[in-house]
Image (cartoon, rainbow, N blue to C red):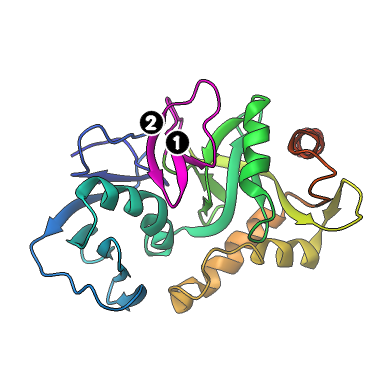
Amino acid sequence: MTSSPLGFGIAVSGLPNGWPHASGPVHTTIPWSIVDEIFDPTGDWWFRETPGGLTIRFRDEGEFRVESTPAPKATVVRGPADERSLALSFSLAVLPLTLPLFGMEPFHGAALGLHGGSALLVTGPPEAGKSTTAAALRAVGLEFLADDACAIDPDGRLWPGPPLLSARSVRAGDERFATYDGKSVVAIEDLDATPRHVQAMVVLQPGDDVPLTVRRVTGAEAIASVLGQVRSPWILPDRRRDPQFHAAAEVARHDVGLVTYEKGRHAPDEVAATIREWATRSG
């Protein structure tokens, strides 16, 4: 079994050869296997909570069954997809949804490393520009920590995600590892998956005819702003209610900023520079 994390402090053994892993502490190890069962190709996609686990089905890929008790494991019924595609879907789509099974709350956004070893979370609603802004921040030297899902533990720490970055285009120096959901996937080399203190979180709020600003919020407004970025709250809701609020409150104890900007008028590097300056002053 591997002792290095695939992501979120979770090591997954049995993935295809050459699968990227990060370096850092592991709190859970999950054996991965493909079971010999017939896959039903009808229907679309669905999820179902099971005793001690969660089952997720994608019509064009397969059925993923993840359990945390009595012993962690992931079994997959293969559909139309091959083993490598199933592993990619598991890493990028399934594992983030199952984080509450392993004591972490997922928030929708990217995470980057700040100087001093802390983390900056970049969140916002769909099409707010999270990936574009995160890419611009990475381009000016911030360390990649997570893409699309930020895992927060009960102490309010970020556990970096898989060393896989989905992007619409590959920048110079990056090498395409795979393609997923119409995007290129880049394997990030030498990702340090040690959990990080969250120094700041921004919520992107693009609009029309608005200035480029970051407004710091506190108290109940900060908690509400963080809770608004919870990823797929309808999955495992009963299990998550209290841990979700606790994780949000821990993040909100630090700096939370609402970022307004206008797409097309404010370039991604301008937005990134404003966020970086604000985050550098925080903490």
Please tell me which residue is depicted at 61% across the width and 45% down the height of the picture. Answer: 131
Residues at badges 2 and 1 in contact (C-beta under 8 Å)? yes
Looking at the image, residue 283 sits to the left or right of residue 64; the answer is: right
Look at the image and give the residue range highlighted in magenta.
163-192
Residue carrying label 2: 23
Figure check: 228 above or below 131: below
Please tell me which residue is depicted at 62% across the width and 36% down the height of the picture. Answer: 135
First-in-chain label (2 vs 1): 2
Looking at the picture, how far across and down is residue 193, in whole percent?
45, 36
**Residue 152: mark in rendering:** none
Q: Work out how far the residue at label 2 is from the one at label 1, CA to CA, in angstroms.
A: 6 Å
Looking at the picture, how far across and down is residue 190, in whole percent?
43, 25
Figure check: 71 above or below 149: below
Q: Residues within 10 Å of mark 2 (few under 14, many from 20)?
A: some
- Asked if residue 66 is among those painted magenta in the image, a careful observer would answer no
The amino acid beneath tag 1 is Ala
Residue carrying label 1: 193
Element class at badge 1: loop
Looking at the picture, how far across and down is residue 110, in whole percent?
58, 46
The amino acid beneath tag 2 is Ser
Element class at badge 2: loop
Looking at the picture, how far across and down is residue 28, in whole percent?
31, 49
- Asked if residue 171 is among those painted magenta in the image, a careful observer would answer yes
- The quadrant the N terminus occupies is top left
